[in-house]
Image (cartoon, coloured by chain):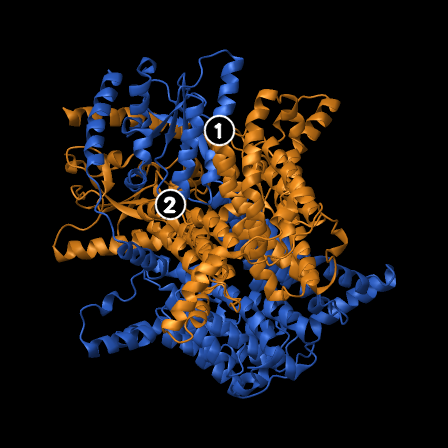
Chain colours: A blue, B orange
Amino acid sequence: MRQLLARGLHVAMQTTHRMFTKWSAPKQSLFKELKFTFNEAFFHDDPLRPFKDQSKSRKLMLGIQAVFPILEWGRRYKLSMFKGDLIAGLTIASLCIPQDIAYAKLANIDPQFGLYSSFVPPLVYALMGSSRDIAIGPVAVVSLLLGSLLQEEIDPKNKYEYQRLAFTATFFAGATQFLLGFFRLGFLIDFLSHAAIVGFMAGAAITISLQQLKGLLGIKKFTKKSDIVSVMRSVWTNVNHGWNWQTIMIGVTFLVFLLVTKYIVNHIERGINPPSLNEIHFTGSYMMKGLKIGVVAGMVALTEAVAIGRTFAAMKDYHLDGNKEMVALGTMNIVGSMTSCYVATGSFSRSAVNYMAGCNTAVSNIVMSCVVLLTLEVITPLFKYTPSAILASIIISAVVGLFDYEAMILIWKIDKFDFLACMGAFFGVVFISVEMGLLIAVAISFAKILLQVTRPRTAVLGRIPRTTVYRNIQQYPEATKVPGVLIVRVDSAIYFSNSNYIRERILRLLNDEEEQLKENSQPRIQYLIVELSPVTDIDTSGIHALEDLYKSLQKRDIKLVLANPGQVVLDKLHASDFANTVGDDKIFLTVGDAVMTLAPKMEP
Amino acid sequence: MRQLLARGLHVAMQTTHRMFTKWSAPKQSLFKELKFTFNEAFFHDDPLRPFKDQSKSRKLMLGIQAVFPILEWGRRYKLSMFKGDLIAGLTIASLCIPQDIAYAKLANIDPQFGLYSSFVPPLVYALMGSSRDIAIGPVAVVSLLLGSLLQEEIDPKNKYEYQRLAFTATFFAGATQFLLGFFRLGFLIDFLSHAAIVGFMAGAAITISLQQLKGLLGIKKFTKKSDIVSVMRSVWTNVNHGWNWQTIMIGVTFLVFLLVTKYIVNHIERGINPPSLNEIHFTGSYMMKGLKIGVVAGMVALTEAVAIGRTFAAMKDYHLDGNKEMVALGTMNIVGSMTSCYVATGSFSRSAVNYMAGCNTAVSNIVMSCVVLLTLEVITPLFKYTPSAILASIIISAVVGLFDYEAMILIWKIDKFDFLACMGAFFGVVFISVEMGLLIAVAISFAKILLQVTRPRTAVLGRIPRTTVYRNIQQYPEATKVPGVLIVRVDSAIYFSNSNYIRERILRLLNDEEEQLKENSQPRIQYLIVELSPVTDIDTSGIHALEDLYKSLQKRDIKLVLANPGQVVLDKLHASDFANTVGDDKIFLTVGDAVMTLAPKMEP
């Protein structure tokens, strides 16, 4: 009965199929097709939509609102919202002040610059940004990255020049972010895969924590390198002055001493941000160095901010224009670089606290900014003496959350290749350096794309007994091959980057099959059915690969059969005349149809 | 009745579906999965297969045969085959001698070097190559490219130094080819798309032909640039010494004179290739320049040779190992660079003639090589005086076939974006320079990959009336939407490079739909069905994108439904626990099942 049902539907479907193939899609003109491709590449979110059919003055108004979203949400702002924003703003301010001081140390700059960076950038972001939950300011990973890149160029002891280069790098970080957003190239940061970021962040957390051993153990001479081997050797040589009772006694006394006394950090300057525009290098070799460091730091900062923005936008379900965000973040860092700030971005830990404390809009950032202003003007002397050990523990507690072992376990479960990328980035940061970890992360991400593009999956299909369903025989051991027929499914669009591989792969599967059949003296293959349902598109090279496959098969007296090509593929098969070469009677709607028609004796 | 049939099969399939989901594929270990990925990336053609289960001495023998295929096919060589090879060899020799002299001119080197390059490289290739039809020697495009790259570094009048750099570039071209093959990175040349090559070749044909105007018109002062504007200006200024009767008379007389008299080409040295090993720069700045030029010329030469090899292998249905071919071509050019040859590769025109003349094996190359040897030793004086005009016409007639307008028309028909790549490369070569054309070709090829990877297609599906088939409503205007349900198909694997785009795209389609429904005051969307059949794989970022989508939908009180996830995707949905979040009752085998279960009133 089920066979009858199946056959009935097959016939019905075949009729429909004929109807479909006769109906051909209206040909798109070159201009239309290119415009569509271009729009999808750069304007897929249709940012100009609200501007349609509006008067000129209204368009101008909308334009200004698009650049400064505060004009739009500010009008709808209610006092009831302010309560949440105030509480959230005060909470993240109390968190950011000690963090700012600590992170400035990671970047090898004076603590007040950390506070400066929590004053101006959040204000600029509040005017231009669209995220309601992000908390802007210096963050641990970017500070560490910036610090390690800068000290390769200039010794941090050369304070003034080091600061100048830091501002230069911040300027170019902002410029990079701005330009990426302005030219709508934001999708480029998607090339850093989630797995690679998880590994990189975890590695950075370990590295940052290890470096705090200096503060925690009160070590004076400490390595400048960030890898675990150098750091542990530094710790070891400092601890291991002869491993005897005296040393241990001194060590214990020292630890007690550490917990009781206070180590002086650098003096914090009182007052708000001084201007720093004329400290930025706009010419010369330092400009190039600043540019290089700025591009790297800017991209990493962007990755963090955009990831945070997206996460919270999804949780509260509002739309976030990635490219507009980049313009806002870029402007914020450009302005920051001119007012003595270093690279600021969205902080994972503070944004989460901001969200939990019930923030409603970017006003919480303004509140935080005001508190930091007060701190700079009034309370700074209170922070004058902060123990290194306390700063170190602040940093460790802030970065510990970056080591997201649960995400790592999930990545392991979902995709082993992703896990490799994650571990590569992690061990790169921990054992070599922050830059190397980043490089490994990018390289593995690209290798994955390369593999995706050049080595698509193929599968040999077999029939699930008593059905007309054909599935991968490696995943369904009960699936049986149809005698005299080899069914191969191609699991990707066929483009120039993979067309040769696909052709060779299919031929190799055929050779393997024929060899095996010969060994068991079974009937040889008469039909090769290529199941094309996952093939969403094909280009000229793809058609040529199919033609080559057809020629190879012809020499062996095997018929090429195509099953279930999509409309796009079908149109191209017809346009290239390859459909005629193969023969319209060799193109079927489903594998079941093809087997039923070509090898009817094999029907179950 | 048809409804009944369809419903019957649906139930049957759903039962099967449950059976499938319960049965889970055996988990692959990390090592196994990585090994598989690595093998598919580098050893997908299983080159070590014949070595399996063989004795040691047999393995050694097979190894030597793998490097020198002549040992294998040589033993099976019969006298009957020699007839075809002899005729083909003599034919291509008669073609190659004038071409070699002409092409050497394109590379700005003395004519004997062209002949040298048709003597040693074909012999080396005959020992190591596996193509039976390729004709080895200098080719027009590579000669032109090499010439224009070399003369940017050294003036060709500085003969000795120019030659040394040419040999250096040839050495590194060979080394590049060898290493790409040895490390099995041959797939890298697949990144130059067929369309880009067609455009590049056509542009080169135009450029080469235009430059022959110098010879044809007997112009002494000619531009060194290769773009059409410079060349036509050169021609114009030389012709346009006042546009009057006298000039035209002189012009006509000159043309007649050209056709009657002979211009002396450079003297051709008698004798075979002198050694040139110690002329290669292995140190210093010229080594770097040679390396740069060599890598570019080597890659272009490789593209041509591999394309030819593949075409003829498909026509005669024999297997060609791309990576082994590259090792053979590389060795041939390395040996060539030490014996006064410049870059040789497979020639389109001569290979076609070779095939037509009935060649059977690479013996035809050996025959050609012997004829060239004879020419060098004996007949060279006959070529001593060859008219420039004749050389020019030889070149033009040889390259005219490279302008493959039929291929261009086909590309236009099949894929508009491919056509853009083709035209970009073509106009780049014609209007700017050969290198620029090449750069444009590579850039457009990469842009296409970028688009493929970051901007996959999505489609809104509707039901074809009176069936349970759901198709793209843009391609099937008769397809109707199901009230209260939005069905979106994702046409690609979901990876980190496109996961955010896919999520945003789906949400935008949903917003568009809801807006439209509101306008027409129709019932709002209750279910979003994502059809996953073309989604062959998903990674961690992809799962996160689905999770974010799920959260956004939850806020709007819309249920997320997944249809037809493949086994790989299903396993990952379960591993990440996202299948539980969505609910197993929201995952269906087909869109039809989902609609039938969730919106049964809508059944036709």
Report the residue that reaches farthest toward the top.
A521
Q: Earlier in the sequence, mark 2 or mark 1?
A: 1
Q: Is residue A244 left or right of residue A471?
A: right
Q: Which residue is mark 1?
A: B316
Helix, strand or loop under label 2: helix
**Residue B540 vs residue A470, the one in the foreground:** A470
Q: Amino acid at mark 2?
A: Ala
**Residue A544: x and y, percent?**
41, 39
Q: Amino acid at mark 1?
A: Lys
Q: Chain of mark 1?
A: B
Q: Is residue B162 left or right of residue A345?
A: right
Q: Is residue A383 visible?
A: no
Q: Are marks 2 and 1 on the same chain?
A: yes
Q: Chain of mark 2?
A: B
Residue density around tag 2, few if under 14, some if 14–19, many if 20 or more, within 10 Å = some
Residue density around tag 1, few if under 14, some if 14–19, many if 20 or more, within 10 Å = few
**Residue A257: x and y, percent?**
74, 71
Cα distance in 3D space between marks 2 and 1:
22 Å
Q: Which residue is at 39% across, 35% downward?
A: B566
Q: Which residue is at 39% across, 64% downward?
A: A322
In the rendering, which numbered label is found on residue B407?
Answer: 2
